[in-house]
Image (cartoon, rainbow, N blue to C red):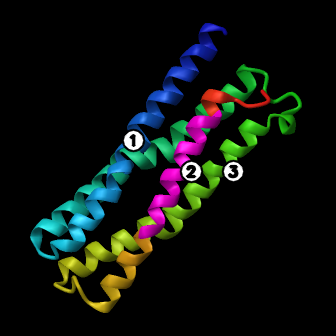
Amino acid sequence: MSAYATTLVVIHVLSAVMGFGPTMAFGLLGPMAEKNPGPGGLALMEGMLAIEKRFVYPAAIVVQPVTGVLLIFARGWNHDFFSHTWLLIALGAYIYALIVSFGVLSPSLHGMVRLAKEGKAGTPEFVALAKRQKLGASTGVALILIIVMMVWKPGG
């Protein structure tokens, strides 16, 4: 592997660890916030939003796609692209995780923070948004699938 490709791999992996690793803790922090509808719960949710804004967004929207595409070309996976099943599975899982994260999880967390700030934590609207957060477990599974595909590369 060239120094260029190695550098891309290092950046890609570090970005994944820094950008997505902390979100694995959201499965613990969310229920803790739900059980503490006061200032403590709000602080936990605001912390989750800060992680999302400072780590997840830059990794998910910029670094991962850019380094991923560059790696595809640097490693020659663009040739017979659709024959690399492991890569297609990983890309599908990534796209799924993005859609769920940015389409469901992030908007519902923002709504929960807004309601908590308005003193409406525990209301039916808040509880409905909190229930949507349970979909976050599926993004964790998607991230694990991506890691397995990237390391194992079955059929690759």
| Residue farthest toward the bottom in the current orientation of the protein | 124
Please name the amino acid that badge 3 sits on.
Gly
Labels 3 & 2 near each other (Cβ < 8 A): no
The local crowd at label 2, few if under 14, some if 14 to 19, many if 20 or more residues have their Cα within 10 Å, is many
Q: Give the label on residue 21, or none.
A: 1
Q: Is residue 98 visible?
A: yes
11 sits to left or right of 112 = right
Q: Nearer the viewer, mark 3 or mark 2?
A: 2
Does residue 72 sit above or below 143 in this rendering? above
Q: Give the label on residue 92, or none.
A: 3
- Sequence-wise, which precedes: disc 3 or disc 1? 1
Q: Secondary structure at mark 2?
A: helix
Q: Is residue 53 visible?
A: no
Residue 32 is situated, as x and y percent measured from the top left of the image, at 21, 65
Labels 3 & 1 near each other (Cβ < 8 A): no
78 sits to left or right of 140 = right
The local crowd at label 1, few if under 14, some if 14 to 19, many if 20 or more residues have their Cα within 10 Å, is some
Please name the amino acid that badge 1 sits on.
Gly
| Residue farthest toward the right in the current orientation of the protein | 80
Does residue 132 sit above or below 147 in this rendering? below
**Predominant secondary structure in magenta?**
helix
- Sequence-wise, which precedes: disc 2 or disc 1? 1
The local crowd at label 3, few if under 14, some if 14 to 19, many if 20 or more residues have their Cα within 10 Å, is some
Q: Which residues are magenta?
A: 134-149
Q: Secondary structure at mark 1?
A: helix
Please name the amino acid that badge 2 sits on.
Ala
Q: Is residue 124 or residue 109 the one in the foreground?
A: 124
Residue 24 is situated, as x and y percent measured from the top left of the image, at 38, 49
Residue in the image at 54% along x and 63% along y: 100
Q: Secondary structure at mark 3?
A: helix
